[in-house]
Each structure stands twice: as structure tokens, then as C-alpha cells.
Amino acid sequence: MSFLVYDFFLNKLGKGEVDFSGYKGNVLLIVNVASHCGFTTQYKDLQKLYDQLSDKNFSVLAFPCNDFFNQEPGSERVILEFCEGGYGVTFDMFEKVKVRGIDAHPLYKYLAAEFLPVIRPRGFSPSLFNFFTHIYFWLKEHRFPHAGEVVWNFHKFVIGRNGQVVGHFSSDCDPFDPRLVACIEREL
């Protein structure tokens, strides 16, 4: 039997432990998030995407993460208030997790082990962001990241209905990037 995303148990913010097997048959977008990141405004588009596709068994699963420049220092209550009050978030928010390194949550170790190439925007700014994140990763981990590792907040993984990772998108890839939307729609 192969390992699937459905084999995990995590705590939903304010609601307790959730068995991921309850998501079987859904297409999932798993995103590590932070309240004080340059990409925090993506919450708005993640919510729009969820609103547009949730009736087709699509779920957004957000995981607050404080691994990058202390961009998610808040408590569970503070994170929920920020997301619900500031962005009207109704998709599933989970406990704060580590997404890289030896202490990474097993879910993120599983996602990073898939070694899918990361789809990222083209151009000078995305290239500069990619360079910055690789240098930051080197300074923290003393090595460069491999293909599947998360290097910043709002990194996105698409999980197909079969529980396998089918797409991997960089932090600076907008939730409505045509390639990300097409990847999700192929699985729906």
C-alpha cells in the first residue's frame, strides 16, 4: 500500500484533531500560510478559489507556519481572528506546523519527498525571489533545497482525488495562475 495524504491526523484550529481520510475523493490545495508575509494577501484569492470550486469536492487546507522570518508569531486565536476577520476565510485552517528541516511535520515531510518540479512565475521578480529563497534556505539549512521542499510561505501543493501530489507551485504563484487552476480542474 502506498503512502497517501489521507494517512495523517492534524488539529484544525479551534476544532481539535481531524482524520485526513475524511478528505478522500476531494481535490486538495495544501498551503503553508503566514499573517505577516508579503504574500498574505493571497488569502483573498485562496478564499475566492475555494468559493468557486468547493461544490465540486475541492478543499483548501491552510497550515500556519513560522519558519520564515517570524512571519506567523501569533497564537491559534490570533491566527483565526486575523484570517476570518481580515480575509473572510472559511476554508480549513490547521495548527501551526514546521514545514522544513528535521522538525518538519510528517505531512510536510511527505509532501517534500515527492520531488515534483516547482512551477513558478517567469520574469525578473520571480527569478530574484527564487534566488533570495535559495540563499535564505542555504543560510538556515546549510544546503540548497531539493525539488520538493518548501522554501517560503504560501507554497502550494495540489493533491488529486487519489491522494497523490499532482502539482507543486511556488509561493509567488498566484492562486489564480492559469497553470495552478488548470492543475486543479484536471483533477476535478
Image (cartoon, helix red, strand yellow):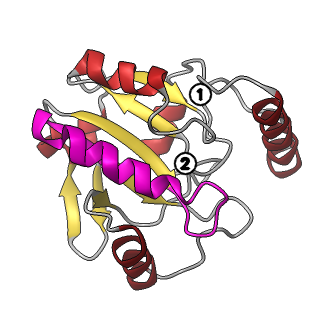
Relative height, residue 69 to residue 24 (above, below): below
Q: 53 or 143: which is nearer to us?
A: 53
- What separation in Å lies between label 1 and label 2 (alpha carbons)? 14 Å
Q: 8 or 12: which is nearer to us?
A: 12
- Cβ–Cβ under 8 Å for marks 1 and 2: no
The span picked out in magenta is 33-60
With 15 as the anchor, is 44 left or right in this view?
A: right
Q: Is residue 1 visible?
A: no
Quarter where residue 22 is shown:
top left
Q: 109 or 74: which is nearer to us?
A: 74
Residue that mark 1 sits on:
148
Residue type beneath disc 2: Phe
**x, y percentage for residue 115?**
56, 20
Asked if the stretch drawn in magenta spans residue 9, the answer is: no
The quarter of the picture where the C terminus appears is: top left
Q: Residues within 10 Å of mark 2 (few under 14, many from 20)?
A: many
Relative height, residue 144 to residue 48 (above, below): above
**x, y percentage for residue 114?**
50, 23
